[in-house]
Amino acid sequence: EAGVVQSPRYKIIEKKQPVAFWCNPISGHNTLYWYLQNLGQGPELLIRYENEEAVDDSQLPKDRFSAERLKGVDSTLKIQPAELGDSAVYLCASSLVGTGLNEQFFGPGTRLTVL
Amino acid sequence: GNSVTQMEGPVTLSEEAFLTINCTYTATGYPSLFWYVQYPGEGLQLLLKATKADDKGSNKGFEATYRKETTSFHLEKGSVQVSDSAVYFCALNAGGTSYGKLTFGQGTILTVHP
């Protein structure tokens, strides 16, 4: 079974440029998460989707960040415009809610560097 | 709010040494507790979990016991291997209104030398 797929794995951009990250969750998983991981820190939740609906986006900086999950499968996270402080690893995870423990499976992440 | 505190690293051990990585938490209600491991260049992988007080999670020789009285979930392994070198994260899922959200500690880097 394929795991969570993310692309690109690495991205280097100039500040003020836009950037987008893509995530394909494990097949059949109804819940998708985007986490932000700063260097030397644990991941922090940005947004959680149940199917197509964003059910927790309280930590998403909505002035510059946006996300969508079309048809309840793949998801895209966008930053526009990027700032120097956005340099971090962006992790996507998925799970099958309703199975009790809600185990989350993580992708390898996209490492963003903003110059 | 919910939070997780891990012992500061990095931790450096020789092969076959005993490992302890401390983890304490703050949460309302009755959280589920997890240890995740991140090998170089890979995503986080669930190592073990516990859902209620006194539960012991175990996997690959690693163990952790959910201690509600001390709000702790320390990770232990009796004999580490070079292949255990990775970053270890303690996390909780508080359930209820934060169902689905994992709150992580800052991670502990483990390096095991031959």
Image (spheres, helix red, strand yellow):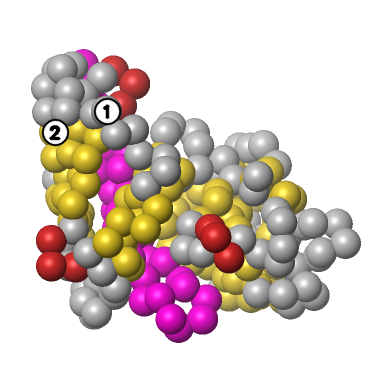
What's under tag 2, amino acid-wise?
Val
The chain ID associated with circle 1 is A
Question: Which of the two discs, 1 and 2, sits closer to the camera?
Answer: 1
Numbered disc 2: what chain? A
Magenta span: A89-115
Say if B60 sits above or below B86 in the image.
below
Q: CA distance from mark 1 to mark 2?
A: 14 Å
Examine the structure image and report whether residue A97 is included in the region drawn in magenta: yes
Q: Is residue A5 visible?
A: yes
Q: Is residue B51 left or right of residue A38?
A: right
The residue under label 2 is A19
Q: Quadrant of the C terminus of chain A?
A: top left
Query: Which residue is found at the position 57% from the left and 70% from the top?
Result: B48
Local SS, label 1: loop
Apparent side of residue B7 relative to residue A42 in the rendered image (left or right): right
Residue B89, given in percent of the width and then of the height, sits at: 55, 52
Residue B23 disc label: none
Task: Answer with the quarter of the image where residue B58 lies.
Answer: bottom right
Q: What secondary structure is marked by label 2?
A: strand
User: Going by the picture, which residue comes out furthest to the bottom?
Assistant: A99
Nearest the eye: A7 or B94: B94
- Whether the magenta-drawn stretch holds residue A10 is answered as no
Q: Which residue is rendered at x = 61% and y = 37% of the image? A: B10
Q: Is residue B13 visible?
A: no
Marks 1/2 in contact by CB < 8 Å: the verdict is no
User: Looking at this rendering, what residue extends furthest in the right direction?
Assistant: B69
Q: Position of residue A17 (x, y in %)?
A: 11, 22
Label disc, if present, on residue A63 of the rendered structure: 1
Label 2 Cα neighbours within 10 Å, binned few <14 / some 14-19 / many ≥20: some
Q: Nearer the viewer, residue B56 or A60?
A: A60
Characterize the local packing of mark 1: few (<14), some (14-19) or many (20 or more) Cα atoms within 10 angstroms: few
| Residue placed most toward the observer, A53 or A113 | A53
